[in-house]
Amino acid sequence: MLTVNDLMTIIPYTVTPATPLRHVIELMKAEGCRQLPVLENGKLVGIITDRDMRLVMNSPIVLHGRWQDEELLDKVTAESCMTPNPMTVTPETPAYRAAGMLSIYKFGALPVVDEDTLVGIITVTDFLDYFAAEQPETVIDTS
């Protein structure tokens, strides 16, 4: 049976609750990821996504000038916009169950923990990559 362990990204990039949004954005851009687990003293305390940051930076509720974006990037931390205590899976979780959780809850990723230690992250992209690799090569006519 295919498990989360077979598909997950091991040892994902992480941030701490005190990490400024500027660094979170830079890390996501540099590493090409959209979700980062948030660790405090080595323990998973949250997850922050690119959507979380867009909501903070482009809130229709709080009007602000673009010049204030610089201050937001340096003063707002991961803790203030992360999802605390995120839903998790274990490496032994059947892949279909993790896929179901991602679909039902409309998550982009689930942290993978083993005995309270973050060991990976499973994303929608991991499932798409697996599915694409399992399909026979096809030629797509773009003309």
Image (tube, rainbow, N blue to C red):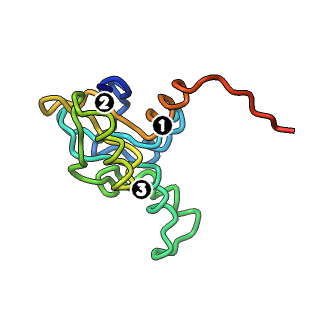
Residue under the image location 43 percent in, 51 percent down: 74
- Which quarter of the figure has residue 122? top left
Nearer the N terminus, badge 3 or badge 2?
2
**Gap between marks 1 and 3 measured at Cα:** 18 Å
Q: Give x and y (percent) for residue 4.
A: 31, 30
Mark 2: amino acid: Val
- Which quarter of the figure has residue 9? top left
Residue 69 appears left or right of 85: right
The residue at which mark 2 appears reads as 4
Nearer the N terminus, badge 1 or badge 2?
2
Label 3 environment density (alpha carbons within 10 Å; few <14, some 14–19, many ≥20): some
Circle 1 or circle 3, nearest the eye: 1
Mark 3: amino acid: Asp
The residue at which mark 3 appears reads as 52
Q: Give x and y (percent) for residue 127.
A: 44, 35
Q: Secondary structure at mark 2?
A: helix
Q: How many marks?
A: 3
Residue 106 appears left or right of 140: left
Q: Residue furthest left?
A: 115
Nearer the N terminus, badge 1 or badge 3?
3
Q: Residue furthest right?
A: 143
The residue at which mark 1 appears reads as 125
Mark 1: amino acid: Thr
**Gap between marks 3 and 2 measured at Cα:** 25 Å
Is 47 or 70 nearer to us in this picture?
47
Q: Give x and y (percent) for residue 22.
A: 46, 46
Q: Secondary structure at mark 1?
A: helix
